[in-house]
Image (tube, helix red, strand yellow):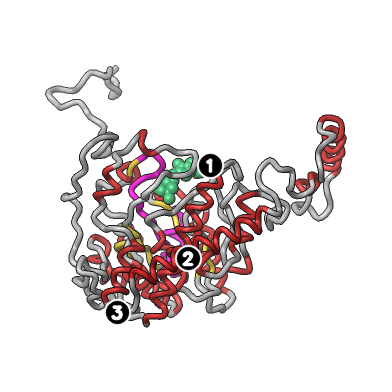
Amino acid sequence: MGESPVRSGKPRGNLPPLELYVPEPKYRPGDKVDYSHLEIPEAGKLARPDEACEASETWPLTTDMIRVLGDDDKAVGPWNPNLDPESLRRMLRNMALTRAFDDRMYRGQRQGKTSFYMKCTGEEAISVACALALAGDDMVFPSYRQQGILISRGYPLVDMINQIYSNRADRLKGRQLPIMYSARDYGFFTISGNLATQFPQAVGWAMASAIKGDTRIATSFIGEGSSAEGDFHAAMTFAAVYNAPVVLNVVNNQWAISSFSGFAGAERTTFAARAAGYGIAGLRVDGNDALAVYAAMEWAANRARANMGPTLIEHFTYRAEGHSTSDDPSAYRSAHEREEWPLGDPIMRLRNYLIAIGEWSEEQHADMDRELAEDVKAATKEAEKNGILGHGLHHPFHTMFEDVFEELPWHLEEQAEQAIRERQTKWPEWKE
Ligand SMILES: Cc1ncc(C[n+]2csc(CCOP(=O)(O)OP(=O)(O)O)c2C)c(N)n1
């Protein structure tokens, strides 16, 4: 008998033993941070191809970075969307409102009014500028960090807070984790806690829109960490094969809770460059530059609407605060990262630009911030009348058995009766 080709496990000859590479973030708590290795191009440098161009023409844009707002507070280059001052102020206001809302809800969680909250600090330009670049009835399949879209579309803050408090006015009847909104009438698909499911859903919705001969496109957002999920690739394949009218966004905020972007592949290539492997258009954009984000989404939306196919956009940004109220980022990353982040703060950059063109002032900005804080406070007080966590003002107990089946199956009916009986004996003080 000949020798088995399966070896004993000993290295062969003088070949080196095989090794795995395990990515490690550059900086850990307490480390000094130096971002000089990041290539940040000058604003205005990149060409803007025609929206109907071949996908391959966009490939240089997937490894570079589209930037409009320069360090000198000027807006430059072919990607400048040339928005009028009123639209710019609306954009700034929505971004500031999103931050004011986040700050108050975060404090509410710390005060025990809700169990959970997620901020998008430092990422406000992405959701707000995209919302303004889309048509109001385009369908959004968001992650949990695009509250700026709902806010920009005018969804009532009180309804958002009712959901966060899971109170008796919560439109979702307390069935979703706080912040996992769902607003069909605002083109905002139900947020799912299962990461990346929204990507294939958006592509499917876009395909259905095309099959029906509709004019609405779909868009979806995931974090760079979630792009390592299989759903990302399934979505990209379907989008490419059927030329679906969809804009797929990867928000690269550098961290997926405590896993840095290297674990999703950031050390090998950019996230936007993945578009090339599927043959679809791709853009990589400075996610802290509201004008660049607007321009990229406008380009991709026009392309999709003209049946020129899908686009993958990477928004390069930084998650300035914790992943959620359950997270403590000081345990795994250096606090200097936020201070040293080379792309600055998105609100300050747009504010400074508006001031530089004589359309805004520091006083106006301070007044706006005060006014927005008051608006959010008033909405909070209003929502609190409907109940906060643990105060008993929630949807009636039995509603948990409703809305799934047209007719409740017998076994659920039994469970419902049993649950109500037990509630009456164990918690007689419970108020419906
Ligand atoms: C399928 C799945 N896996 C894991 C989790 C747990 N989880 C929730 S958020 C998160 C990090 C996601 O990071 P990223 O996609 O980069 O988005 P970010 O939170 O940074 O916006 C993880 C691992 C989950 N909710 N679903």
Tag 2 and tag 3, C-beta contact below 8 Å: no
At label 1, the amino acid type is Arg
- Residue on which the image places disc 1: 110
Q: In this view, does 206 lie to the left or right of 318?
A: right
Which secondary structure, mark 2? strand
Does 82 sit above or below residue 184? below
Q: Which mark is residue 81?
A: none
Q: Which residue is drawn at 56% across and 47% down?
A: 108
Q: Which residue is drawn at 26% across and 67% down?
A: 66
Q: What stretch is highlighted in magenta?
A: 232-259
Magenta highlight on residue 396: no
Rounded to the nearest angstrom, the CA distance separating label 2 from label 1 is 33 Å
Tag 1 and tag 3, C-beta contact below 8 Å: no
Q: Is residue 88 left or right of residue 70?
A: right
Which is more N-terminal, label 3 or label 1? 1
Which is more N-terminal, label 3 or label 2? 2
- Residue on which the image places disc 2: 219
- Residue on which the image places disc 3: 358
Which secondary structure, mark 1? helix
Which is more N-terminal, label 1 or label 2? 1
At label 3, the amino acid type is Gly
Q: Give x and y (percent) for residue 398.
A: 81, 45
Q: Which residue is drawn at 50% across and 59% down?
A: 147
Q: Give x and y (percent) for residue 141.
A: 52, 61
Nearest to the observer: residue 107 or residue 194:
107
Q: In this view, does 401 lie to the left or right of 188?
A: right
Crowd class of label 3 (few under 14; some 14 to 19; many from 20; radius 10 Å): few
- Tell me the mark number nearer the camera, choosing from 2 and 1: 1
Does 101 sit above or below residue 209? above
